[in-house]
Image (spheres, rainbow, N blue to C red):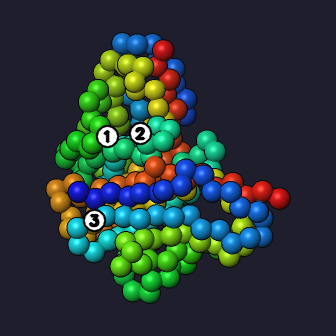
Amino acid sequence: AQSVAQPEDQVNVAEGNPLTVKCTYSVSGNPYLFWYVQYPNRGLQFLLKYITGDNLVKGSYGFEAEFNKSQTSFHLKKPSALVSDSALYFCAVRGYILTGGGNKLTFGTGTQLKVEL
Amino acid sequence: NAGVTQTPKFQVLKTGQSMTLQCAQDMNHEYMSWYRQDPGMGLRLIHYSVGAGITDQGEVPNGYNVSRSTTEDFPLRLLSAAPSQTSVYFCASSLLGDPGDTQYFGPGTRLTVL
């Protein structure tokens, strides 16, 4: 079975400071990892994904994520946070072996990011 | 290209009532799915479909039915609503065949069961 852990329910950071939202995963075979963002009363928006190749993945709105196979982690980062980045962030994983379940994604419980002035 | 659309945006039901949440996509995606989002629990898969006429259960299917008669549409039916089904429901779609395919989400339906 595949699983995702987001150990922090909330992350607070000052505007202009770097931010990190943590994610660790467990999956059989090679992992396919995704980050989504959810603004209040909105659906989930895709930010970025890791499939293969370079361990540092760049995505939308200046976000990037670092894949670390030995630590089974895929932390989301941004060099300089903005107040407008305040939202709920979800990490998700899909294993390489496609079962009869097709493209099932497993989500973490989410991390609320709060960026303050 | 509207992406994934869901109706209604909000709904209040009484216990025992039935209703259908609508989901449609215009990206010709084979894979469609329904999730529910509850505080502190992330998103949990209810049902999914890998093509017209093919559906299967996710991790929390009880109390929900689905069917898929076309590629575009994937409605979710609540046969007899219960307060435990109060949640935000999201529909998502993607291509099928590559585990790196991105799932795209609709704006959600906020359901309250009294």
Q: Nearer the viewer, residue B97 or A48?
A: A48
* Horizontal side, residue B14 vs residue A31: left or right: right
Residue at mark 3: A27
Q: The disc numbered 3 marks a residue on which chain?
A: A
User: In this rendering, which labeled residue sits more in front, label 2 or label 3?
Assistant: 3
- Three-letter residue code for mark 2: Arg
Say which chain tag 2 marks.
B
Q: Which residue is at a point 41% across and 65% down the rendered structure image?
A: A24
Q: Position of residue B21 (x, y in %)?
A: 41, 32
According to the picture, the residue beneath numbered tag 2 turns out to be: B36
Residue topped by disc 1: B46
Nearest the eye: A35 or A109: A109
Residue A19: give x, y in percent of width and height: 65, 68
Q: Are marks 2 and 1 in contact (CB under 8 Å)?
A: yes
Distance of label 2 from label 3 (alpha carbons)? 22 Å
Contact flag, marks 2 and 3 (Cβ < 8 Å): no
Task: Name the kind of residue labelled 3 in the image.
Answer: Val
- Residue located at (33% from left, 50% from top): B32
The spot of residue B37 in percent (x, y) is 45, 40
Is B100 situated above or below A113? Answer: below
**Amino acid type indicated by mark 1:** Ile
**What is the C-alpha distance between the residues marked 3 and 1?**
21 Å
Q: Please, what secondary structure does the residue beneath circle 1 have? A: strand
Residue located 76% across and 63% down the image: A14
